[in-house]
């Protein structure tokens, strides 16, 4: 797994215990953690290849520590990320406030990072509607406002989980094929290439 | 001296023995090997000259051997002639001048000492300083030789690897060597500029491989790994923790900071380790070893793999403790804890070095990159750590920081599950046990010493007491009180006196 080539970095952001790890675990291993599992060493980093059309895109999924004490460091995590899945708990309104905070951070610091808003634990809502604290339409409005995709997922049942990551991979593919010419060669390479070649030839 | 005078006094000395051994007619002196002052000076000069020449010859021989060994340690085509060959003979030459001077002084001293012991021309005294020369000399070249040996090994591997690539391989090799030569002329650039140069080189080379040679992205990655290894091994010395940055100062600050935070416990960081499980503590120890080992690697990627290994051990430890896979919420605090325990040498320099000179694709996306990012986070957290981030009150934090209190002592109010530090760590337990054994030993030693002292005192007082007793008895039965009878028999009973023969009169005289 360590040797696997990774195309895009995807960070998971969200308050503690909103289910970031479970979401990744469900997506990668198709299971929901209820009891002790011994076979995986950790779910903090996963490289997952996804079939998108004819191409295979490998997402490197970065789990992050959600505790507020590490909030100051979160910027280090999402540096260079191509996508961020900002999670909130549908049954916990404070987690949505925290999600808003992360969205703002991302918009300020990482403009190339696409944002995916993800309301987790939708299975709890379908069992008992009164548990819902974040209205679907409020979240959708917020998503529209920031230009993000919005999903409500359940790691327990697996509902909408594959769709979320598939969307991430597809978006990456379309932007990278579109952006390859525009961004990487256009902005990154040309100016640097010249300077280095010049100095090389010059000194020899 | 005293020996000599004794001998003189004891044995008769012939007149000829006192003359100079050279037969010049002057008197000789034993301190000058039986020579007169003039002959001694000549002789001494000659010997000294010879000694210096011998030292030179030896040094030269050593150097030739070394060069031969050096030349045979690598193939002729692998060694870029401009690189490391010239620096090696130089240290030898440079050290030779002052060294022989120093050696000369030393022999000077030695000969003087030797004369009094009368061993001056014996072979053993001649060879002894030589041996010292050899031993004293070798370490410095051998250390640098070792370092260059590693470098040579890397270049050899690199060339072997490139051979398989044929034409692109030659091109890559040429470019890398040109780049390294180029870099050596840019020593005074700032660290960021150096980093930019290296990163540009990576980028250009990768682009060229992709574009010109139509390599697949996997093989490009392979090549880039090798290129990174080769280049960074060679550049390491000049670009790791360069003088133009304040990396070193930051290293020291971090080190002191971590030292000051020695009191931070697992509970404060909410780490899910149960170090009483042997497997967990084993993994913790391994993780600590790995993160410390990072400093010893030269290639950024090797440093990264140390971090990755460390992280894997942490994950194992968490999994064993919690019986479920660890998430980032468990991992980061655990890594912080490990960093605090390990206090890895030159942490900031290493982080900076990796950031500046690692292949960016690896750093930004892959698994190694993830763990490295966590390490950066841990370092940042430790730097900014305050009372709030440990869930402590500012007063408590202040007290712990100033060393006025230790969290283990205030166990009663905080209700720690194990207030005693001993059982938390088997190493610590072992240490405590050893301390106990040592203190027991020192107690016994003291008792022994006391007994010895009292024995000594007893022994000292014994003759005194005996003398005292004898004295008492003598006093009791004084000698001269009985003029009529013998004083020698005064300790006998009067009854016995009758049995004794009478002739005692001669003794009275």
Image (cartoon, rainbow, N blue to C red):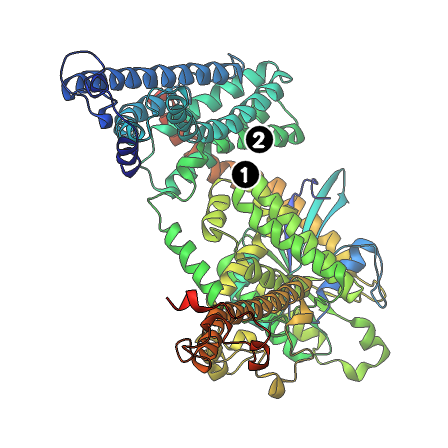
N-term mark: 2 or 1: 2
Residue closer to the observer: A34 or A41: A41
Q: Secondary structure at mark 2?
A: helix
Residue B134 position (above or below residue B275): above
Residue closer to the observer: B298 or B177: B298
Residue closer to the observer: B362 or B500: B500
Residue B417 vs residue B494: left or right? right
Q: Position of residue B165 (x, y in %)?
A: 63, 18
Q: Is residue B421 visible?
A: yes
Q: Output the chain of dot 2.
A: B
Q: Position of residue B201 (x, y in %)?
A: 47, 31
Residue that extends furthest to the bottom in the rendered view of this protein: B413
Residue at screen point 42% across, 14% down? B64
Residue A7 vs residue B473: left or right? right
Residue B355 vs residue A196: left or right? right
Residue at screen point 53% across, 63% down? A73
Q: Position of residue B378 (x, y in %)?
A: 55, 60
Q: Which residue is mark 2?
A: B224
Q: Quadrant of the N terminus of chain B?
A: top left
Residue A51 position (above or below residue B51): below
Q: Output the chain of dot 1.
A: B
Q: Where, by quadrant of the figure, is residue A79 drawn? A: bottom right
Q: Position of residue B59 (x, y in %)?
A: 37, 19
CA distance separating discs 2 and 1: 8 Å
Per the rendering, the mark at residue B22 is: none
Residue closer to the observer: B295 or B304: B295
Q: Secondary structure at mark 1?
A: loop
Q: Quadrant of the C terminus of chain B?
A: bottom left
Q: Which residue is mark 1?
A: B359
Callout 2–callout 1 Cβ contact below 8 Å = yes
């Amino acid at each position: 797994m360590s040797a696997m080539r990774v195309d895009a970095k995807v960070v998971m952001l969200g308050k503690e215990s909103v289910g970031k790890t479970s979401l990744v675990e469900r997506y990668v291993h198709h299971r929901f953690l209820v009891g002790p599992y011994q076979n995986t060493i950790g779910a903090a980093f996963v490289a997952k290849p996804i079939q998108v059309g004819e191409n295979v895109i490998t997402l490197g999924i970065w789990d992050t520590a959600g505790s507020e004490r590490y909030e100051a460091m979160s910027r280090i995590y999402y540096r260079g990320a191509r996508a961020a899945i900002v999670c909130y708990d549908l049954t916990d309104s404070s987690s949505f406030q925290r999600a808003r905070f992360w969205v703002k951070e991302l918009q300020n610091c990482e403009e190339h990072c696409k944002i995916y808003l993800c309301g987790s634990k939708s299975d709890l809502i379908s069992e008992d509607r009164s548990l819902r604290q974040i209205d679907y339409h409020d979240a959708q409005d917020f998503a529209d406002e920031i230009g993000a995709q919005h999903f409500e997922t359940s790691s327990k049942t697996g509902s909408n989980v594959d769709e979320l990551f598939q969307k991430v991979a597809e978006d990456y593919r379309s932007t990278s094929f579109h952006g390859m010419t525009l961004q990487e060669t256009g902005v990154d390479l040309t100016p640097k290439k010249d300077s280095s070649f010049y100095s090389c030839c010059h000194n020899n | 001296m005293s020996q000599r005078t004794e001998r003189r006094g004891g044995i008769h000395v012939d007149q000829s023995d006192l003359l100079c051994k050279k037969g010049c007619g002057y008197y000789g002196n034993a301190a000058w090997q039986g020579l007169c002052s003039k002959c001694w000076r000549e002789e001494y000069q000659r010997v000294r000259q010879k000694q210096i020449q011998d030292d030179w010859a030896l040094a030269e021989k050593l150097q030739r051997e070394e060069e031969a060994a050096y030349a045979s340690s690598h193939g002729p085509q692998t060694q870029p002639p401009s690189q490391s060959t010239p620096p090696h003979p130089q240290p030898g030459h440079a050290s030779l001048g002052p060294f022989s001077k120093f050696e000369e002084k030393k022999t000077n001293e030695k000969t003087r000492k030797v004369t009094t012991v009368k061993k001056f021309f014996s072979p053993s005294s001649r060879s002894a300083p030589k041996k010292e020369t050899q031993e004293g000399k070798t370490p410095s070249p051998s250390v640098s030789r070792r370092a260059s040996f590693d470098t040579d090994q890397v270049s050899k591997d690199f060339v072997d690897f490139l051979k398989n690539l044929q034409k692109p391989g030659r091109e890559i090799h040429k470019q890398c060597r040109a780049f390294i030569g180029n870099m050596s002329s840019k020593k005074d650039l700032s660290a960021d500029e150096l980093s930019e140069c290296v990163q540009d080189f990576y980028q250009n080379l990768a682009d060229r491989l992709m574009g010109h040679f139509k390599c697949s992205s996997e093989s490009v990655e392979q090549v880039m790994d090798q290129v990174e290894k080769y280049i960074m091994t060679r550049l390491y010395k000049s670009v790791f923790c360069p003088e133009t940055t304040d990396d070193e100062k930051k290293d020291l600050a971090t080190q002191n900071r971590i030292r000051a935070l020695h009191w931070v416990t697992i509970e404060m960081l909410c780490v899910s380790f149960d170090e009483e499980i042997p497997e967990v503590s084993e993994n913790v120890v391994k993780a600590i070893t790995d993160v410390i080992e990072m400093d010893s690697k030269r290639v950024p990627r090797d440093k990264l793999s140390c971090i990755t290994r460390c992280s894997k051990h942490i994950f194992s430890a968490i999994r064993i403790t919690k019986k479920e896979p660890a998430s980032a919420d468990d991992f980061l605090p655990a890594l912080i804890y490990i960093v605090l325990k390990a206090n890895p040498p030159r942490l900031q320099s290493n982080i900076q070095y990796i950031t500046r000179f690692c292949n960016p694709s690896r750093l930004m996306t892959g698994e190694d990159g993830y763990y490295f990012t966590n390490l950066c986070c841990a370092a940042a957290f430790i730097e900014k750590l305050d009372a709030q981030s440990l869930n402590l009150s500012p007063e408590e934090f202040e007290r712990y920081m100033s060393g006025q209190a230790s969290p283990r002592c205030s166990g009663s109010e905080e209700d720690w599950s194990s207030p005693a530090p001993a059982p938390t760590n088997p190493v610590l337990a072992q240490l405590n046990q050893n301390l106990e054994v040592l203190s027991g030993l020192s107690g016994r030693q003291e008792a022994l010493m006391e007994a010895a002292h009292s024995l000594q005192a007893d022994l000292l007082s014994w003759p005194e007491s005996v003398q005292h007793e004898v004295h008492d008895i003598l006093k009791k039965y004084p000698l001269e009180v009985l003029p009529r009878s013998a004083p020698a028999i005064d300790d006998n009973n009067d009854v016995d006196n009758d049995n004794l023969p009478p002739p005692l009169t001669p003794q009275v005289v």
